Amino acid sequence: MAMHWYVVHAYSGFESQVQRSLKERIERYGMQDKFGDILVPTEEVVEMRAGQQRKSERKFFPGYVLVQMEMTDDTWHLVKDVPKVMGFIGGTGDRPAPISEKEANAILQRVQEGVEKPRPKVLFEPGEVVRVIDGPFNDFTGVVEEVDYDKSRLKVSVLIFGRSTPVDLEFGQVEKG
């Protein structure tokens, strides 16, 4: 049998614990040949805190763990019996369906991109109202005109003396209004 990717529903916040427990059980029962990768899909995000850039991880499917495995009765029971696992997503209760190769590759690609190029934690969109919290325009509110995620900068239109003035700011200098 070939290995396929399955989505396992876990308690939210316990994805890493489920991943660890699953790896330990596979080792204990000697089923390494029936399992491939066990993955909690995360991406690295960057945020500004107290003027410093901090990196953290964000799960983009909270409550889910991806498991690459051969589906047999033994492997099914091994996964189902892990604490904090609610079951598989897709298929029927006793016969879960794997996700397609295309879906699995899209998720793996997104994980890889998150490692190579961290995304900002807060996403801005043109037309959105923001408040400036740092710099010479502190406490001004404005409307986002352009967003440059590569440079982590925004062009914000701020009202100064009754005139709309475009101001170039970093993500860390504004907050959503």
Image (cartoon, helix red, strand yellow):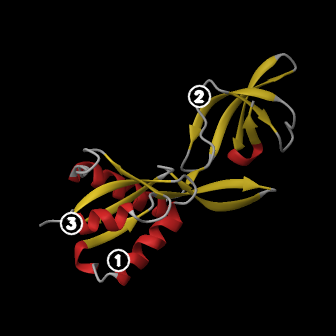
Residue type at the position of mark 2: Pro
Q: Residue furthest top?
A: 162
Q: What residue did someone put label 1 on?
A: 26
Q: CA distance from mark 1 to mark 2?
A: 49 Å
Q: Cβ–Cβ below 8 Å for labels 1 and 2? A: no
Q: Cβ–Cβ below 8 Å for labels 2 and 3? A: no
Q: What mark, if any, has residue 70 been given in the picture?
A: 3
Q: CA distance from mark 2 to mark 3?
A: 46 Å
Q: Residue at x 70, y 46 (%)?
A: 170
Q: Residue 127's x, y, as percent?
A: 62, 23
Q: Residue at x 84, y 30 (%)?
A: 140
Q: Residue 141's x, y, as percent?
A: 79, 28
Q: Residue at x 27, y 67 (%)?
A: 75
Q: Secondary structure at mark 2?
A: loop
Q: Residue at x 49, y 51 (%)?
A: 63
Q: Secondary structure at mark 3?
A: loop
Where is the N terminus found, in terms of image quarters? bottom left
First reached walking from the N terminus: tag 1 or tag 2: 1
First reached walking from the N terminus: tag 1 or tag 3: 1
Q: Residue 29's x, y, as percent?
A: 32, 81
- Relative horizontal placement of residue 36, taking residue 53 as reference (left or right): left
Q: What residue did someone put label 2 on?
A: 126
Density class for disc 1 (Cα within 10 Å; few <14, some 14-19, many ≥20) is some
Density class for disc 2 (Cα within 10 Å; few <14, some 14-19, many ≥20) is few
Q: Secondary structure at mark 1?
A: helix
